[in-house]
Image (cartoon, rainbow, N blue to C red):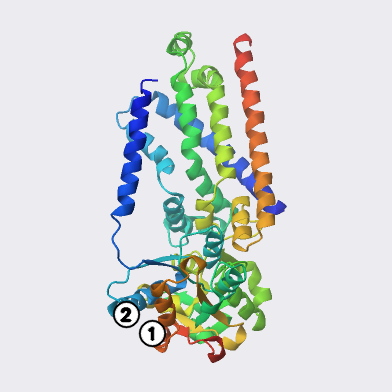
Amino acid sequence: MDWQAIWLSVRLAFSTTAILLLVGVPLAGWLAFSPRRWRFLVEAAVALPLVLPPTVLGFYVLLAIGPRSPVGALYARLTGGMLPFSFQGLLIASALYSLPFAVQPVSGAFQSVDRKLIEASWCLGVSRFATFRRVVVPLARPGISTGAILSFAHTMGEFGVVLMVGGNISGVTRTVSISIYDQVQALRYDAALETSLFLLGFSFVVLALTYALQKRIRSTWPMN
Amino acid sequence: MTLSPITDHSIAVAALAAFLLACVSRPQAPQPVTVAAASDLQFALEDIAGDFRRSHPSAEIRIVYGSSGNFYTQIRGQAPFDLFLSADVEYPRRLASEGLALPDSLFTYAVGRIVVWAPAGSPLDPARLGMGALEAPSVRHVAIANPEHAPYGRAAAAAMKSMGVYERVAGKLVLGENVAQALEFVESGAAEVGIVPLSLAVAPPVRSRGRYWEVPPGAYPAIEQGGAILARARGSRLALDLRNYLAGPAVRDRLKQYGFSPPAPRETR
């Protein structure tokens, strides 16, 4: 079994989830509460990775982070490194690819928070930001954890984008899905079966654990 | 449930009637032939198939391009292909020994060649530097196809080893899923140089966009591209004609223009 690839995928999935929580929660907040009329344009842009094939996304990301692009050139000037074929490059691609999976459940949860509670908080003189942090976010916790789980699971299972931008470097960009693909291509069906089975079991356990946990959070929070 | 059993029944009858009608009204044209071809044939085979169609006007030939390893797996899963043109003669050989291809139809149609390739605008000139281009200080990434399953990737790795640069280049290698992706990595600038098939370097859309140096054929084991008729096309006249045409001298000359070498004489039947 390719433990190195499994470990890499787990690290990638955790880092992607962390980034998406940092970026996705404020973005979801903006989407849920902004009065701007062009909000729907941002909503559509966030949802794009759901519709676009991973090949399109991967192809664009490779061009966008390559050394000839402004982003790639800036990164090279700042760090002396290159984004394509690096863990950081993969992280950017994964975060883009899983963005809707993080933003949509969180934004939905924000929207379903009782407006009266928010307005009551404002009336008590609590600032908008503090209300968001202390009222809206805690009430939307199930939605936030759903977003986090989906981002994690989606990144674990990511294939097409990694295939397009990764370069298949062992320990750096060869994720578990790529490793399984390689094993099938090299006709090592036994190894492929073993790794696939592990991934299946791992994914199921992670999902089952988090859903069980979520149920407990949901059923206990009214009492806190 | 709003549907009555009668409606369900009549839907089934209508579906059956439609199915039977489709079976009956199929025209009596010669059986079409579906070819599963290695992606490095993409440019050459269109021309060759065009030539073949001229002598067989009623022939219907469909060509699907992809990775030879993928095709091998799919054919084992009863994929509906009649002729398999692999980038590596090993796959059809295996299919023949598994009873999935006709052993008599096994043939080698070309030998692949590899080149060190850099984009036209690059300061690296492979024609001058040869294999040394991979070791140039400006080179951070060297793109090749994955040697684990791509025949051209295997040849690239073998050539680097036999020419004594592998140890120093290994840390810079990035692996494309196939040769086309390896080329794409270099074209996009993400990798500075790559080892790709000559057939790709001289292909019309690529020719003017890069410079190359051919790796001497002695530096790596020959990339024998072979094919076979698959078991499901047993008795198909058209499949046999096409296979014999591909093994013939006219195609050999055509393939030379597209960056392949003719197969060694002992390999053809």
* Chain ID, mark 1: B
Q: What residue type is labelled 2?
A: Asp
Which residue sits at x=50%, y=17%? A131
Q: Name the spot of residue A104 as percent of width and height, x first.
A: 46, 31
Residue at the extreme bottom of the image, as rendered: B265
In the visual, does A196 lie left or right of A123? right
Q: Which of B42 and A11 is in front in this view?
A: B42
Q: Which label sits in the foreground, 1 or 2?
A: 2
**Image quadrant of residue B130?**
bottom right
Q: Which amino acid does label 1 sit on?
A: Arg
Q: Which of B86 and B130 is in front in this view?
A: B86
Q: Name the spot of residue A82 as percent of width and height, x first.
A: 54, 59
Disc 2 designates what residue?
Answer: B51
Which residue sits at x=41%, y=38%? A47
Q: Name the spot of residue B127 as percent of width and height, x first.
A: 48, 85
Badge 1 element: helix
Where A196 sits versus B148, above or below? above
Q: Residues within 10 Å of mark 2 (few under 14, many from 20)?
A: some
* Chain ID, mark 2: B
Among the two numbered marks 1 and 2 on one chain, the one whose residue lies closer to the N terminus: 2
Q: Which mark, residue B254? A: 1
CB within 8 Å, label 1 to label 2? yes
